[in-house]
Image: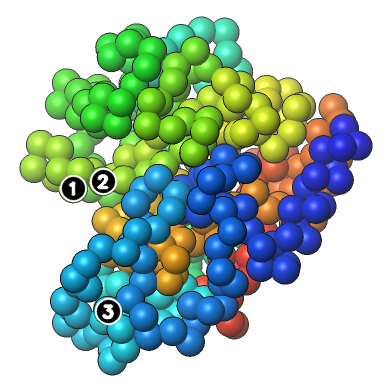
Amino acid sequence: MQRTIVWVVALAAACTLGARLGVHAQVVRQSPHAAPPPEHAAAGSNEPDLEPTGKGWGELKGPARQPGGGARPGGNGKVKGNGINYHNGPLILGTTNVYYIWYGDWSGNSATTILPDFARNIGGSSYYRINTTYYDAKGAHVSNSVALSPAQYNDNYSHGAALSDSAIQSVVAYAITSGGVPKDSNGVYFVLTSADVNATSGFCTSYCGWHTHATIAGTDIKYAFIGNPDRCPSACSAQAVGPNGNAGADGMVSIVAHELEESVTDPDFTGWYDRRGYENADKCAWTFGTVYQTANGASANMKLGSRDYLIQRNWVNASGGSCAQGY
Ligand SMILES: [Zn+2]
């Protein structure tokens, strides 16, 4: 326990120094894509921004995309924000609907109450309000509003226990086209895998989760993969004992928060990200700010509804920009 607390504090200090572990998506704690340049290098640069890959690091894709309507002068048609830039694409506006797709074997696992509880209470919080500092080309800001769909879908290993990226997309597509969950362009669909399930493109080695989008049944669908950190605690869990007594689920909460706020502010990879291809949550990955101890000895940094959580900070796109626990 003592080691855990020291580790959290050390990471918070690392963020202050601008030496972060994380890149786009929720990368593992020791990422091969680490060692980014200082974040504030982005603020004054006219170079094209690297594009998010969805897997946690940016790639320079050439040629630079055409500046969109309303773009201001300066590389790549981007609009400069506070240490993060806008690339003229859509955001998710209004209430964002969360859809959970439970993949594998979740029987008897308290994750099935912890994660829905979290999704019902993150909207309206000081933490989620950070996302309202992001806006689109018309000046419309993200809302501090999230709803959990009552329709949750259970997938009993339809694609086995080793999922490729395309298999994960197929899981989402089938949940929608079969009518298990509604088709919703204002939704984010989370594929939540049990600890016996791997994602073969790099779960536990490169990332703990990721988000992307695809056209499914004619609609632009935003979806995310969220692995169970019980599969690789040293890579994807912040601590051995979570605030709600389920280290895997408690770890997944922070990963869901990360992918949710990125999906809202950069749903199609044409929204908000910085010069390195880091989206808002990437810029604060694995940093938690001020923590307190819960009754079971875990560290937590916020209470949403009736539960304590340890959730990574997010990037505030205001006042020069910073990682924060609330806004
Ligand atoms: Zn990310």
Q: Position of residue 239 (x, y in %)?
A: 74, 33
- Look at the numbered disc 2 and say if its residue's Cβ is closer than 8 Å to ligand 1: no
Which quadrant is home to the C terminus?
bottom right
Q: Position of residue 111 (x, y in %)?
A: 57, 22
Q: Position of residue 123 (x, y in %)?
A: 51, 51
Q: Amino acid at mark 3?
A: Asn
Name the residue carrying label 1. 220
Q: Are marks 2 and 1 in contact (CB under 8 Å)?
A: yes
Q: Label for residue 151?
A: none
**Which is nearer the eye, 160 or 121?**
160
Q: Position of residue 259 (x, y in %)?
A: 45, 46
Q: Are marks 2 and 3 in contact (CB under 8 Å)?
A: no
**Which is nearer the eye, 70 or 275?**
275
Q: Earlier in the sequence, mark 3 or mark 1?
A: 3
> Badge 2, how many Cα within 10 Å: few under 14, some, many 20+?
some
Query: Is residue 14 left or right of 294 when viewed as pictured?
Result: left
Task: Kindly identify the residue that appears in the image at 68 percent across and 53 percent down.
Answer: 287
Task: Kindly identify the residue that appears in the image at 53 percent across and 79 percent down.
Answer: 41
The Cα–Cα distance between marks 2 and 3, rounded to whole angstroms, is 22 Å
Task: Kindly identify the residue that appears in the image at 40 percent across and 45 percent down.
Answer: 55
Q: Amino acid at mark 1?
A: Asp
Query: Is residue 102 left or right of 215 when viewed as pictured?
Result: right
Q: For numbered disc 2, what is the local secondary structure?
A: strand
The Cα–Cα distance between marks 3 and 1, rounded to whole angstroms, is 24 Å
Name the residue carrying label 2. 213
Task: Kindly identify the residue that appears in the image at 22 percent across and 26 percent down.
Answer: 170
Name the residue carrying label 3. 76
